[in-house]
Image (cartoon, grey):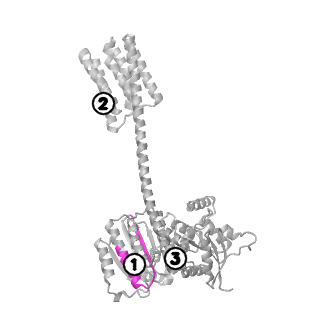
Amino acid sequence: MLLATMLYRVSHLTVGLLAVLQHQRDQPAHYAALFVALALSVLLFGTALRRGWFDRRFLWADILVNGATLPLALCAWGGADQSAELGWVMLLGTSSSAAAAVVLRRWTLLGAVALLALTHLLGYRLVSAGTAVILGHTNSLLFSAAMAWTFWWYLRRQGRMLDDANARTLAAEARKARYAERLEHHLMLHDTVLATLTTLASGSVDANSPHVRERCAREAARLRRLIQQTADEEAHQSIAEALEGAVADAERLRLRVTVQCHALPEVPSEVATALADAVREALNNVRRHAGTDHAYVTATGDASRRSVRVTVVDRGPGFDPRNYEPGLGLRRSVHDRMAQVGGRAVLDTAPGEGVRVELRWPG
Amino acid sequence: MAGVITVALVDDDRMLTDGMRSWLGDQPQLRLVSTAATVGRLLEPAPPAAPYAPADVVLLDLRLRDDSTPGENIRRLLHSGSRVLVISTVPDRTQVIASIRAGADGYLTKDNDLPTLVAAIEDVAAGRGAHSPELAFACAHDDSPSRPRLSPRERQVLLDYASGMTLKSAARRAGITVHTAKDYLNRVKAKYRQAGRPTYTKIDLARVVREDSLDDG
């Protein structure tokens, strides 16, 4: 609408220029009026183009000066005494009213258009124009405003409808993503918890057998992790998801794992994979050497430094680190794996005190 | 019956109360004296039952279905003269912290084994307070603005204990004795209780009510 009203004004200025050049070559007042009109137009539309929308002050200046004052001024000093000589400057009022229609609210708009109409009637009265000229001009003045207003209203309505449609599409996509995630959880639950519960309910297995109890405990642990992961919405999921794989593997091999996570940062995927590989190997060591069926995996992050620390702890017999020759697993799969991605692994143990493997990234 | 610890259980899962009855039934040093689905029902049993005699330790489920908040439940139980050990299926950290602030003596998830549970009940009954990695983790990673200030040593022991290490190993790592390490954990808990001590101005009461209703969500 900015561009449309500006083009409207440019056409009127062109008419003005031609009219002045043709008929009023020797009348400085008309040149002055043209200059004023041009200057105000540049001010109004130039600032509007730069800022993206009209400045009300300049619009009012345009309405009052170009629309209301110039016609009367030309009558008074420009020696205009025929309606034809006044025609070009009257046109400016119609483009003023068009601009007013897209900027001003209802009552101020009506006031501005009424003001323009009255001064123009007065101007034509002063040059005693014919009724047809007066009616025709008033008509175009009012309809410039009405058309501009209608276009603007239509465009805004279309814009709103488009925005609504976009918002609806985005909401639908978010819903779809949530649904996909829920479905994934449901499928996982279906294959594990639901299958176990259904079998137990059917009475076909002995619920108290060690095998069934183990399976129930494993699935309960998994559900617990799922709930906590979902509750911790601010945390990024890449590390938690990678660790979940390692933990699930260990649980299948009958190790009970207590997992706790806090404020995990987003890390490159190879770092998440390296952490998970190292945790998998550390858990393997617990299972093989620690003589306990319980391990603790704790992953915490420092969001400001984008660092992460994962510990794998058991409460088994531990060993004396002075007599320690790292086995292939710890050395290659834990130390080397962490070093590859710029991380570090630290081992801490003493006889009778369990083993603590700490993984840090960056190292 | 000297030396026998009386235990009450507030949990609205019937299967769990049955399971707990059979679990604790095998423990000569513990006696489960009453179970109820809500704290109100425990403190004021329906007429045919004998009036409630406060148990030494009440096991309280963190999340009950009667719209009560852990804070409110714990304050009522403490007022009745019992100590409180909170249990739950999932460690909702905000609620765990709220429980300790309200004066609970310990917190455990329900997946712990029987020896751990029995040891915790005995610790709570003896007034020592029970510690668990899940409680330590909730305190160590509490980032609410009203958290108490911990010294670096307290924090290190708390973090190591939260990561699953035994108190003995955490003490060795910090270069202190087990007693000192346990003292640190007790101090952390005491700081939370201090910060959560009931206050009696109207504004403070309004704040407590607000916090409790937030906790509820």
Mark 2, Cα crowd under 10 Å, few <14 / some 14-19 / many 20+, is some
SS state under label 2? helix
Q: Quadrant of the N terminus of chain A?
A: top left
SS state under label 1? helix
Residue A88 falls in image quadrant? top left
- Could you tell me if residue A349 is visible in this image? no
Name the residue carrying label 2.
Answer: A42
> Do discs 3 and 1 share a chain?
no
Residue A327 falls in image quadrant? bottom left
The amino acid pointed to by label 1 is Leu
| Of the two numbered discs 3 and 1 in the rendering, the one whose residue sits closer to the viewer | 1
Residue B19 falls in image quadrant? bottom right
Residue A243 vertical placement versus B3 (above, below): above
Q: Residue at x 25, y 19 (%)?
A: A18
The amino acid pointed to by label 3 is Ser
Name the residue carrying label 3.
Answer: B132
The amino acid pointed to by label 2 is Val
C-alpha gap between disc 2 and disc 3: 76 Å
Task: Report whether A266 appears left or right of B204.
Answer: left
| Of the two numbered discs 2 and 1 in the rendering, the one whose residue sits closer to the viewer | 1
SS state under label 3? loop
C-alpha gap between disc 2 and disc 1: 75 Å
Count of residue discs = 3
Name the residue carrying label 1.
Answer: A283
Task: Report whether A121 appears left or right of B107.
Answer: left
Circle nearer the N terminus (2, 1): 2
Q: Residue at x 49, y 64 (%)?
A: B144
Residue B82 vertical placement versus A38 (above, below): below
Range of magenta residues: A277-303
Q: State yes or no: residue B186 in magenta.
A: no
| Of the two numbered discs 2 and 3 in the rendering, the one whose residue sits closer to the viewer | 3
